[in-house]
Image (tube, rainbow, N blue to C red):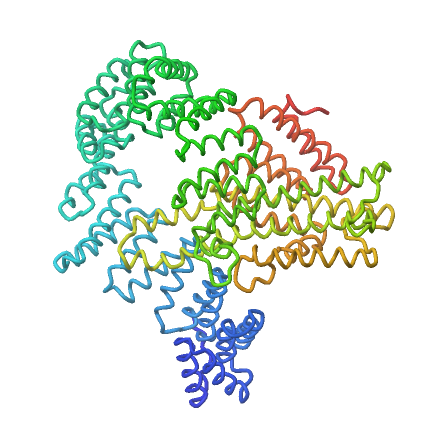
Amino acid sequence: MVVRRTPVLSSKEDTAFREALSLYDSKQYKKALKLVEQTLKKSPNHAESLALKGCINHFVSTKAEADLYVRKGLARAPGNHLVNHLAGIYFRNVEDYAEAAKWYKAAIDNGSQNKQILRDLATMQVHNRDYKNLKDSRQSFLEEQPGFRANWTGNAVAQHLNKNYSGAISTLSKIEGLIKEHLSASDMVEHSECLLYKNSIMSEAGDFEKALKCLNHDEPDIKDKLSVLEYRARYLLLLGEKKEAALVYRRLLQRNPDNSSYYTLLEVAMETSEMSVDIRLKLYEKLARFYPRSDPPKFLPLTFLPASHPEFLNKAKEYVLSQLQRGIPATFVNIKPVYKDKAKMKVIEELVLKFYKEEVSKLIPTVTVWTRYFLAQHYLYLNDLTNATKYIDQALEHSPTLVELYIVKARILKHLGQFEQAAEAMNEGRELDLQDRFINSKATKYYFRANKVDKAIDTISLFTKLEDGAVNGCKDLHLMQVNWVLIESAEAYSRLYHEFEAKLREYRASVSAGSTTEPVEEDGDEISVESIENELIENIELYKGLALKRYHAVIKVFDIFYNDQLDFHSYCLRRGTPRDYVETLKWEDNIHGTPIYSRVLKGLSQIYLEIYEEQEASKKLKNESGDLAGSNKPKKNGKKQKKAKAQVMKKKEELVAKVASVADDQDPLGSNLLSGLITNSHGKVLDNLFELFKPLLTEAKSNKLTWELAYELYLRQGKYILAMQAIKSLNSILTKYKDIQVEEINTMVNKLASTARSDPDANAAIVKVVEKGLSTSFPEYFTV
């Protein structure tokens, strides 16, 4: 390959550029900018200076101006390795990692002697999941700097990510051999982790025999003895050496008898899981004698013993009643998994009721209150709210200062639909222990559910650090990335604007019917219909903007989560934790599949699709009449309109201090965000939503919401074949929910067919393909 080179600057200019570059590296941006501008006055086409000015402007000027100068530099000298390197740095700073990788690669190809660029290039490639090119970059960097173990580990990780298991094992083994005689005591923790990493690669490759042999050989040098035991037990089990595996699992139980997975795996090793329940019961009775203070050997028999088995009642009595007698608040939570079997649930109900009626009164008073607490939770689980209320009220009468009782009382009120009373009940419990962060968070959540957003924020702000002059901890909650608060507030704002939309529809309907009289203000003036409508519309836009603002705040947090891994690409290798690093990459690959992100997309999609439908309706109305009558734009009404507007502005100014998410927030109410969506060209709203939704297609394939939202988007975009595929994916997820499946799939199939047929812009061949596909895949739902 011929390396292209661009002539360097003249000696004087080169000196000024180097000095400016040094100042830039030391973050003295203003001094660096002054030197660069002096050079550009004399030579305005110097590509290096243009690119450096762009990098400096990223920190001292506007982003647009910075981008302009970097691209100017690239246009002047695309083959200059200094310009390429600066472009890579710039695009990394603006989080355009694909473009950064491109220009780092160009800097190497164009003859840069700075081999540190290879490390930066590798960082960008792994961040972009470009594993194919990553292995070449890591190999080249290792060849340049073979004296650092981190570089060998980085090369092995690259090979591992490319599923070149033998190469990764060979690389790790080679460096182990080279440094074996030179390891100090401080190196042994890193050495231990790398040995376990190599062993995990062998396991992933499926060579369990080799992995076990290697583990036994390396055990003296491995510090993490728990991982050694877990790996060994797993390998023995997979190799069929079940007797030896059982011995190892017993050693693990000695270390941690509260780990229920060890009991399950011990049964697999002893092959008792397929034996009679009596044999299994004897095993757990023996284990319970060995570990009398552990919960699993007492609880697990309840999961496999049938309700009709004579020992089930005895074991349930031993487990449940002993906890009630000791006053353990989590008794119901502990036994709740057994409730999946209704017969077992009935036995436990009868057992506790009998205990409550016949024995509780003979015991200490605390047993009474905890038994009532248990029964209240039991009946709440059954949705028998009358009995649940009875028992929790009795418990509160008995012990009115017990915080846990108020939590259950609030939950019952929530299930009754009394959200405000539920919030007050939870707050009453909170006031009993003002230092309890958990009950404070529960009270906050319940205030949100009651749409009392200000009260909720004030409550959670008791545990935030308030800045001087801050009204509440809203900014701190954003800074600390408290996602559950952000999404609860977004959903509360969403409910509020829907309430005002319902009021607006009711009011317009009453005006149309002539049943509304003009309301009168305190000063005797009548309030016009337009003023009332304007106020309702202002509230709709206010709360819709705030809902959008909070939803997008969570989206930004997820972006931060993803970008924060940038530091781990070098840190984990330097600290010698490759196992954790690879696990972090896997976690980041599915970060958008988490329930919280799905909740955000569900709420956002509702708002985006509503705006899209409003745009559709406005477009249709404009085509029909050339007028936008009936739109939700506030109407002017002279002095009264100005007075109402002034009141709204005052309300917004007071609200800004409460809802601003960052210092100097340019759009605290989300009004710019909302207006930007509303004024988008037709169809742009769907494109914006699809960009947010796209990660779910790969990271949350088993999520019901993914395919429901995909269907809605594809249907509106006219992508009918993709909409059909979304229905098929959803249908496979809903197979275990027959009633929901029949109703939802039936609706979606027929809606897709009718929409495709009635679309004048649809390709006739595609419509036929869709109809054929629906009739073949869903013959029970599809109607011609």
Identify the residue shown where x is 24% and y is 52%: 172
Of 229 and 88, which appears nearest the observer? 229
Quick check: 56 left or right of 584? right
Quick check: 297 left or right of 709? left
Q: How many marks?
A: 0
Identify the residue shown where x is 18% and y is 22%: 289
* x then y, percent, for residue 685: 66, 50
Of 207 and 480, which appears nearest the observer? 480
Q: Eyeballing the image, is 602 above or below 1?
A: above
* x then y, percent, for residue 218: 16, 46
Identify the residue shown where x is 44% and y is 75%: 82
* x then y, percent, for residue 442: 46, 40
Looking at the rendered image, the quarter that the C terminus falls into is top right
* x then y, percent, for residue 322: 28, 22
Looking at the rendered image, the quarter that the N terminus falls into is bottom left
Of 491 and 206, which appears nearest the observer? 491
Of 455 and 93, which appears nearest the observer? 455
